[in-house]
Image (tube, rainbow, N blue to C red):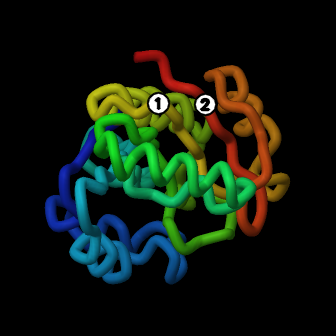
Amino acid sequence: MRSRVYDSIDDIDSKLIEALPTGLDFSYGLLRVMERSLWGELLVRYVTVEDDDGLVLAFTPVYVGSNLNFNALLPKFIQKGYNAMVGSLGSAIATRVAVVGSLISDRGWIPMHPDLTERQGAVRLLLKEIDGVAKEHHAQLGMLKDIHRDFPADERAIMRAAGFMEGFSLPRFALTQAMDL
Protein backbone atom coordinates (compact mmCIF):
# COMPACT_ATOMS: atom_id res chain seq x y z
CA MET A 1 0.00 0.00 0.00
CA ARG A 2 1.06 3.54 -0.67
CA SER A 3 -0.50 6.94 -0.14
CA ARG A 4 -0.89 9.63 -2.73
CA VAL A 5 -2.17 13.22 -2.97
CA TYR A 6 -4.07 14.53 -6.00
CA ASP A 7 -4.54 18.23 -6.77
CA SER A 8 -7.91 17.71 -8.48
CA ILE A 9 -10.65 15.10 -8.58
CA ASP A 10 -10.12 15.14 -12.35
CA ASP A 11 -6.70 13.54 -11.77
CA ILE A 12 -8.34 10.39 -10.36
CA ASP A 13 -10.14 7.88 -12.58
CA SER A 14 -13.82 8.16 -11.63
CA LYS A 15 -14.20 4.37 -11.80
CA LEU A 16 -11.69 4.02 -8.95
CA ILE A 17 -13.81 6.27 -6.72
CA GLU A 18 -17.08 4.65 -7.81
CA ALA A 19 -15.72 1.28 -6.58
CA LEU A 20 -15.74 2.66 -3.02
CA PRO A 21 -18.84 2.84 -0.81
CA THR A 22 -19.01 6.64 -1.12
CA GLY A 23 -22.72 7.31 -1.06
CA LEU A 24 -23.70 10.73 -2.36
CA ASP A 25 -21.53 12.60 0.18
CA PHE A 26 -18.22 11.45 -1.32
CA SER A 27 -19.40 10.73 -4.85
CA TYR A 28 -17.11 11.71 -7.70
CA GLY A 29 -19.70 13.98 -9.31
CA LEU A 30 -20.55 15.86 -6.11
CA LEU A 31 -16.91 16.34 -5.16
CA ARG A 32 -16.20 17.60 -8.69
CA VAL A 33 -18.99 20.20 -8.41
CA MET A 34 -17.81 21.22 -4.92
CA GLU A 35 -14.22 21.62 -6.13
CA ARG A 36 -15.36 23.95 -8.91
CA SER A 37 -17.43 26.05 -6.52
CA LEU A 38 -14.61 26.83 -4.07
CA TRP A 39 -13.84 30.53 -3.71
CA GLY A 40 -11.10 32.71 -2.33
CA GLU A 41 -7.98 30.85 -1.34
CA LEU A 42 -9.83 27.72 -0.20
CA LEU A 43 -8.55 24.68 -2.06
CA VAL A 44 -9.01 20.93 -1.94
CA ARG A 45 -6.59 18.03 -2.21
CA TYR A 46 -7.57 14.36 -2.41
CA VAL A 47 -5.67 11.83 -0.31
CA THR A 48 -5.77 8.19 -1.32
CA VAL A 49 -4.30 4.91 -0.21
CA GLU A 50 -3.71 2.66 -3.20
CA ASP A 51 -2.48 -0.85 -3.81
CA ASP A 52 0.51 -1.58 -6.05
CA ASP A 53 -1.76 -1.70 -9.12
CA GLY A 54 -3.26 1.76 -8.46
CA LEU A 55 -6.58 0.51 -7.04
CA VAL A 56 -7.91 3.12 -4.60
CA LEU A 57 -8.37 1.43 -1.21
CA ALA A 58 -9.20 4.53 0.87
CA PHE A 59 -10.03 8.08 -0.09
CA THR A 60 -10.85 11.46 1.43
CA PRO A 61 -10.79 15.11 0.40
CA VAL A 62 -8.80 17.65 2.45
CA TYR A 63 -10.00 21.27 2.27
CA VAL A 64 -7.36 23.86 3.21
CA GLY A 65 -7.76 27.57 3.68
CA SER A 66 -8.68 30.38 6.00
CA ASN A 67 -12.04 31.39 4.58
CA LEU A 68 -13.93 28.65 6.46
CA ASN A 69 -16.38 29.92 9.04
CA PHE A 70 -15.12 27.62 11.77
CA ASN A 71 -16.02 30.15 14.47
CA ALA A 72 -19.77 30.01 13.75
CA LEU A 73 -20.57 28.51 17.17
CA LEU A 74 -18.51 30.96 19.19
CA PRO A 75 -20.20 33.82 21.04
CA LYS A 76 -21.09 36.73 18.75
CA PHE A 77 -18.64 39.15 20.37
CA ILE A 78 -15.73 36.77 19.64
CA GLN A 79 -16.93 36.24 16.06
CA LYS A 80 -17.22 39.97 15.51
CA GLY A 81 -13.80 40.64 17.05
CA TYR A 82 -12.11 37.93 14.99
CA ASN A 83 -13.81 39.06 11.77
CA ALA A 84 -12.86 42.70 12.49
CA MET A 85 -9.20 41.75 13.02
CA VAL A 86 -9.10 39.75 9.79
CA GLY A 87 -10.93 42.56 7.99
CA SER A 88 -8.48 45.23 9.09
CA LEU A 89 -5.22 43.28 9.18
CA GLY A 90 -5.88 40.97 6.23
CA SER A 91 -6.25 37.27 5.72
CA ALA A 92 -2.61 36.69 6.67
CA ILE A 93 -3.71 36.62 10.32
CA ALA A 94 -6.69 34.36 9.68
CA THR A 95 -6.51 30.86 11.12
CA ARG A 96 -5.60 28.38 8.40
CA VAL A 97 -7.54 25.15 8.72
CA ALA A 98 -7.34 21.70 7.10
CA VAL A 99 -10.77 20.03 7.11
CA VAL A 100 -10.73 16.35 6.18
CA GLY A 101 -13.86 14.78 4.73
CA SER A 102 -16.88 15.91 2.81
CA LEU A 103 -17.96 19.41 3.80
CA ILE A 104 -21.61 18.40 3.56
CA SER A 105 -21.48 14.98 5.24
CA ASP A 106 -22.24 13.87 8.77
CA ARG A 107 -21.88 10.14 8.15
CA GLY A 108 -18.70 9.77 10.19
CA TRP A 109 -16.53 7.68 7.94
CA ILE A 110 -13.75 7.50 5.39
CA PRO A 111 -14.63 5.62 2.19
CA MET A 112 -12.62 2.39 2.10
CA HIS A 113 -12.69 -0.40 -0.46
CA PRO A 114 -14.74 -3.42 0.72
CA ASP A 115 -11.75 -5.72 0.06
CA LEU A 116 -9.34 -3.65 2.18
CA THR A 117 -8.03 -5.91 4.96
CA GLU A 118 -5.38 -3.57 6.40
CA ARG A 119 -7.70 -0.76 7.50
CA GLN A 120 -5.47 0.38 10.37
CA GLY A 121 -2.47 0.61 8.06
CA ALA A 122 -4.57 2.58 5.58
CA VAL A 123 -5.66 5.00 8.33
CA ARG A 124 -2.02 5.56 9.31
CA LEU A 125 -1.05 6.27 5.69
CA LEU A 126 -3.99 8.66 5.27
CA LEU A 127 -3.06 10.54 8.44
CA LYS A 128 0.56 10.89 7.29
CA GLU A 129 -0.51 12.40 3.96
CA ILE A 130 -3.17 14.60 5.59
CA ASP A 131 -0.48 15.95 7.91
CA GLY A 132 1.74 16.61 4.89
CA VAL A 133 -1.02 18.52 3.08
CA ALA A 134 -1.75 20.55 6.22
CA LYS A 135 1.92 21.44 6.69
CA GLU A 136 2.41 22.30 3.02
CA HIS A 137 -0.44 24.80 3.26
CA HIS A 138 0.55 26.11 6.71
CA ALA A 139 -2.64 24.94 8.47
CA GLN A 140 -2.78 25.80 12.15
CA LEU A 141 -5.71 23.52 12.92
CA GLY A 142 -6.63 20.14 11.47
CA MET A 143 -10.06 18.56 11.68
CA LEU A 144 -11.16 15.06 10.73
CA LYS A 145 -14.77 15.93 10.10
CA ASP A 146 -17.52 13.86 11.68
CA ILE A 147 -15.50 10.88 12.82
CA HIS A 148 -17.75 9.74 15.64
CA ARG A 149 -18.71 6.69 17.66
CA ASP A 150 -19.94 4.83 14.56
CA PHE A 151 -16.36 4.83 13.23
CA PRO A 152 -14.35 1.78 14.41
CA ALA A 153 -12.91 2.40 17.88
CA ASP A 154 -9.48 0.97 17.06
CA GLU A 155 -9.16 3.36 14.11
CA ARG A 156 -10.30 6.33 16.23
CA ALA A 157 -7.56 5.30 18.69
CA ILE A 158 -4.99 5.61 15.87
CA MET A 159 -6.27 9.14 15.20
CA ARG A 160 -5.99 10.08 18.87
CA ALA A 161 -2.46 8.61 18.99
CA ALA A 162 -1.60 10.90 16.06
CA GLY A 163 -2.51 13.92 18.19
CA PHE A 164 -6.18 14.43 17.34
CA MET A 165 -8.70 15.09 20.12
CA GLU A 166 -12.43 14.38 19.93
CA GLY A 167 -14.73 17.36 20.14
CA PHE A 168 -18.19 18.47 19.17
CA SER A 169 -18.97 19.60 15.65
CA LEU A 170 -22.15 20.23 13.75
CA PRO A 171 -24.03 17.98 13.71
CA ARG A 172 -21.85 15.39 15.41
CA PHE A 173 -18.22 14.97 16.44
CA ALA A 174 -14.91 15.83 14.88
CA LEU A 175 -11.33 15.10 15.79
CA THR A 176 -9.14 18.19 15.84
CA GLN A 177 -5.43 18.80 16.09
CA ALA A 178 -3.37 21.94 16.54
CA MET A 179 -0.75 21.73 13.80
CA ASP A 180 2.99 22.12 14.37
CA LEU A 181 4.39 24.70 11.97
Q: Quadrant of the N terminus?
A: top left
Q: Which residue is at the front of the view, 90 or 19?
A: 90
Q: Residue 166: horizontal and vertical position, in percent?
A: 77, 40
Does residue 20 appear in this view?
A: yes
Q: Which residue is at the front of the view, 14 or 177?
A: 177
Q: Which residue is at the front of the view, 161 or 59?
A: 161
Q: Residue 69: horizontal and vertical position, in percent?
A: 51, 60
Crowding near pointer 1: few (<14 within 10 Å), some, many (20+)? some
Q: Secondary structure at mark 2?
A: strand
Q: Toward which corner of the image does residue 97 lie, by quadrant?
A: top left
Crowding near pointer 2: few (<14 within 10 Å), some, many (20+)? many
| x 32%, y 40%: residue | 89
Q: Which residue is at the front of the view, 92 or 180?
A: 92
| x 43%, y 51%: residue | 57
Q: Is residue 13 above or below residue 168?
A: below
Q: CA distance from mark 1 to mark 2?
A: 8 Å
| x 29%, y 37%: residue | 92
Q: Residue 134: horizontal and vertical position, in percent?
A: 38, 33
Q: Residue 86: horizontal and vertical position, in percent?
A: 39, 46
Q: Earlier in the sequence, mark 1 or mark 2?
A: 1
Q: Quadrant of the C terminus?
A: top left
Amino acid type of the residue tagged 1 in the rendering: Gln
Which mark, residue 45?
A: none
Identify residue for label 1: 140
| x 84%, y 53%: residue | 149
For residue 57, side relative to residue 174 (left or right) = left
Q: Is residue 168 above or below residue 39?
A: above
For residue 93, side relative to residue 144 (left or right) = left
Identify residue for label 2: 177
